[in-house]
Amino acid sequence: MLADQDDNQTLSLTRQLISAESVSPVDAGCQDLIAEQLQQMQFNIEHMPFEDVSNLWAWHGSGAPYFVFAGHTDVVPALPASDWQTPPFEPTILDGYIHGRGAADMKGSLAAMLTATRRFLTTSGQHNGTLAFLITSDEEADAINGTRKVMAELAARRIDLDWCLIGEPSSSECLGDVIRIGRRGSLHARLRVKGIQGHVAYPDEALNPIHVAAPALTALVNEIWDAGNQNFPSTSMQISNIHAGTGTSNVIPGQLEAMINFRFSTETSEADIRQRTEAILDAFRLNYEITWTLSGNPFLTTRGELIPAVQRAIKDQLDIDTRLSTSGGTSDGRFIAPGGTQVVELGPCNATIHKVDERVSIEDLNSLASVYQRVLEELLR
């Protein structure tokens, strides 16, 4: 009976969280709801707002080891809303799925974490160490005033996290078939190539930045940055945007702007990518400016107790052997792992995340809560 009640509560919490229009960095009351649930379980609650971002740090127990559930309440925009089968912030159940923005990424995971925690504390009573929650509303956008700053505050307090399970939607074909044990780094570049504006009929009196930049951009595209390794694919580079010109056909533009992104493995570094990129641009004698923004370095968990505990929990509850992966985009694990914390990402299937008609299986949410509970039993009992 308890499991049935908790399953219903998982669904109810998921619905309440989806109903909050928490487009990043707005939290829209999600963390108050989570804090209320945790207070009922005798957690200590601390809100850590930084500028326009809401952050929640909550803990139960004391001392090491620290196990942390981490996640985010913010979501990407649900536009155009008219394309959705059901309104994106009105959670709707259809054919065994709950539909709504954030259902899979990652409000369903947050609800499952709360259910798992309630069950664990009810059945285990006292536990070893500290069980904590680190929740932010700044993961889907700038990721400046969220987990990054909370981790800095925890470091200042000399709180060292041992294990962190992030509820990102890691699963591919079925729940638990993939867990992420790391992510590639992400480095952005904004390139401005300067030319000389002029009339297209008089090219000798102008300098077309599109023409002079094209060979250099081609060289960047063809560059082999590294070969990857057993844990990471090779580093990739993508030009995501190019803009030049005034919008008319008879003016040679005065400058070109390009946005470039590198997803890089542990085989290279931010400094190496920057040096090699600028060397290529210099080789073509471009008049350029380039600004760099590091979103995060690669991180990887390979040793320790967390990965085996998650593997055993998935095998025990779902009867499948999970695959370890470092694929996908960035996550807040990039701010948690550098301090030595073991980080694993485990959540529902990611087929509909950031898409119209995002949804998650209700059965999977209930199973996910059971897996999370089993992980807690493996590590804190």
Image (cartoon, rainbow, N blue to C red):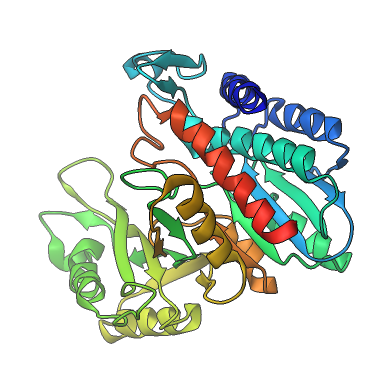
- Position of the N terminus, as image quadrant, is top right
Disc tally is 0
Q: Residue at x 46, y 54 (%)?
A: 315
Q: Is residue 74 above or below residue 168?
A: above
Q: Residue furthest front?
A: 1
Q: Is residue 10 above or below residue 378?
A: above
Q: Residue at x 74, y 58 (%)?
A: 380
Give the x, y percent position of residue 71.
Answer: 62, 45
Q: Is residue 273 above or below residue 116?
A: below
Horizontally, residue 265 falls left or right of residue 222, namely: right
Give the x, y percent position of residue 217.
Answer: 24, 70
Give the x, y percent position of residue 242.
Answer: 29, 54
Can residue 358 be seen in this snapshot?
A: yes
Q: Residue at x 35, y 27 (%)?
A: 356
Closest to the observer, 217 or 115? 115
- Position of the C terminus, as image quadrant, is bottom right
Horizontally, residue 315 falls left or right of residue 37, namely: left
Horizontally, residue 71 falls left or right of residue 94, namely: right
Can residue 139 be seen in this snapshot?
A: no
Q: Is residue 155 above or below residue 271?
A: above
Q: Residue at x 40, y 72 (%)?
A: 264
Q: Residue furthest left?
A: 201
Closest to the observer, 345 or 244? 345
Give the x, y percent position of residue 77.
Answer: 48, 30
Closest to the observer, 67 or 263? 67
